[in-house]
Amino acid sequence: MQKEGFVMVKKRAKTKVNKARKQPQNPEPQHIQPQIPVIIMGAAGRDYHNFLTTFKNNHLYKVIAFTAAQIPGIENRAFPKELAGPNYHEDIPVFPETRLPELIKEHNIQEVYLSYSDLSFQEVMEKASKILAAGAKFCLLGLSTMLRTEAPVVAVTAVRTGAGKSQTSRKVASILQDLGYKVVAIRHPMPYGNLIQQEVQRFASAKDLQHAHVTIEEREEYEPWIRMSVPVYAGVDYKKILQEAEQEADLIIWDGGNNDFSFYKPDLHIVVVDPLRPGHEISYYPGFINLLTADIVVINKVTNAPRKNIQQVIKNIRKWNPRARIIKAASQVSVEHPESIAGKNVLVVEDGPTLTHGGLSHGAGTVAALKHKGRIIDARQFAVGSIKDTYAKYPHLGRELPAMGYSKQQVKELQDTLNNAKCDLIIDGSPVNLQHIIRVNKPILNVKYELEELGKPTLAQLITKHFKG
């Protein structure tokens, strides 16, 4: 019976097959997944990286537009189709972020991805609420956007703009050079010009900066590396940038900006926190992510911060990332010809991003001026054009002048502001030497600031242990 039953099953199966063969072959059309319309909120940096790593070749999504904030003059342009890939036959427009609610409704946007940094948690949720109220989903991308590398990576990031990350990056580079590594820096993006021309950039000399027509903000970040004889890469496409950098590097330093997290998966992650702004290390996006993922946390400016602030920062580090090693450090400020400052009326210029969206009222220039008994004048009364607008946009700013220079026109307005000022000399606390960029009718003294570790362990000890065992 078992055998007969087996034969009968085979026959029934065969009959079904034969019937199927006799039926007309009209397969159902394949279901085409509709594309999800997306907007990416950005500031000409993380937004492009998120697009290239997550959306460029993703057929499920269609990026309808970018929006722009923080940086003046980057809206009302476009992300070029040449960089956007085969799914995009037209440039992707960039609109001011203020238009986001109307864009959501006009294009039936389903998802909006916040893709820039140095925002308080309050600001993040305000933006999220406006997006949700307009009918779209509010989305964030995380560490999945990190690219893997062949060369080891030391990522240096911060919890806020102006914490002292750049001087820490330089200290790390010096340590690695002393260990015998050929070091190359890759800088967080600042592509404010022609994006096709800026897809992959390498800077190793002053001529490279001139050829690329870099902004003051870019020059502030690239010049210190060039002075150290460390090539620095930046641009738009960080996968292509990595391919170029790895050809000449034993080890890569990710020089993070704007308290963003690294574009590359680090072998060692160093994060700088600022005790002059206690609590910001756990209340800003995405700086808190940096704190949570840090291997080493550098508490900078400890000689300028109240003890209770330092204790609060340490408490927060130990609560949220107890495995991280803590280093205390000071930002040592020096100025050329300090004897010429005492009793003089001085105008102080500070790093632009540190004072604007970084939220600080002063920086190294003010420290130097007060240390050497200069009388700081109020730069606001001499401001013109977009420099004057900057003071209106950031009401926390005081008498110091932010070194704004995102366009030729703004550089000229910065120059006019300095020339209008009634003072004896200018103290330049920005990382760039303004004398190389503008012409002013009064002396300029340049301020330098370097990281000095206080106590043990030191960065050299921890870095050597990590890479040399």
Image: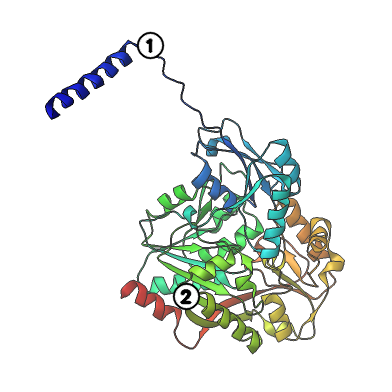
Q: Is 336 left, or right, of 318 in this rendering? A: right
Under mark 2, the amino acid is Ile
Q: Quadrant of the C terminus?
A: bottom left
Closest to the observer, 450 or 435: 450
Name the outermost residue toward the right.
381
How packed is label 1: few (under 14 Cα within 10 Å), some, or many (20 or more)?
few
Residue at which label 1 appears: 24
Between 374 and 263, the residue placed more toward the observer is: 263
Picture layout, residue 330 above or below residue 68: below
> Horizontal and vertical percent for residue 298?
52, 77
Q: Where does residue 359 sit, x and y in percent of width and height?
A: 71, 69
- Closer to us: 443 or 4: 4
- Cα separation, mark 2 vs mark 1, equals 68 Å
- Is residue 73 visible from the viewing direction of this image? no
Residue identifier under label 2: 296
Taking the image as shown, residue 364 lies to the left or right of residue 52, namely right
Tag in front: 2 or 1: 1
- Which label's residue is closer to the chain start, 2 or 1? 1
- Compared with 64, 268 (above or below) is below
What is the secondary structure assignment of the residue under circle 1? loop
Q: For the point 59% across and 69% down, which residue is it? A: 159
Callout 1, which amino acid? Pro
Give the label on residue 190, or none: none
The quarter of the picture where residue 374 lies is bottom right
**Element assignment for label 2:** strand
* Among the 4 quarters of the image, the one containing residue 379: bottom right
